[in-house]
Image: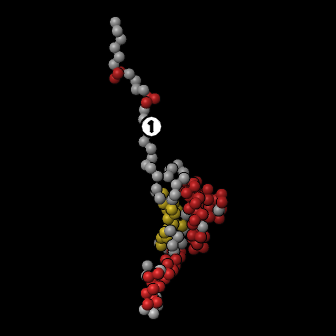
Amino acid sequence: EPEVHDPAARPPDLSRRSPPPPEPAGVPDTAKSWSGFVSRVGESLPFLSAILHKADFKEISRETLTFELHGTSFEMSRVETKRNELEAICNTYFEKKIRLNIIDKTPRGQNKQTKNGKTPAKKKQEVLNHPVITAAVKIFNGSIVNIKE
């Protein structure tokens, strides 16, 4: 008697299973943690690693790594002066271009958020140096009295 094969009765062929869906494109590997990043920073910038150990990690997205920096204003200025080096380490570590978003919780910058390394003083200086502003001051023979954020 011929043998009849019922395809529904066969066990599934596991070798043909599709792979699990990949992580959404561009999201850094979540297995690489904040503490791992801070350790990597410590390899070349140990003083910054010590500062970052006191910071609070907030989130990482496709484009930014956000953390709150507590401590002294001196520590904040050290982080700001080394921002480019920190971002380079971040980009290498997470294998993706990621911008740092530092929330300044130091006494000098309580609740002020710095973006792209621009402190309030830098922002004011940019306004003062803007070509339209300098032209207006020159044309009207004026001066800048106050700059509001």
Residue 66 visible in the picture = yes
Specify whether 81 is left or right of 128: right
Judge whether 132 appears above or below 13 on screen: below
Judge whether 139 appears above or below 11 on screen: below
Image quadrant where residue 46 sits:
bottom right
Quarter of the N terminus within the rendering:
top left
Report x, y in % for residue 50.
62, 63
User: Dot 1 corresponds to which residue?
Assistant: 19
Residue 35 visible in the picture = no
Residue depicted at x 34% and y 14%: 4
* Residue type, mark 1 in image: Pro
Residue depicted at x 52% and y 57%: 97
Q: How is the image coloured?
A: secondary structure
Judge whether 25 appears above or below 42 on screen: above
Quarter of the C terminus within the rendering:
bottom left
Judge whether 109 appears above or below 37 on screen: below
Image quadrant where residue 83 sits:
bottom right
Report x, y in % for residue 67.
51, 63
Q: Count the numbered circles shown.
A: 1
Residue most extreme to the top:
1
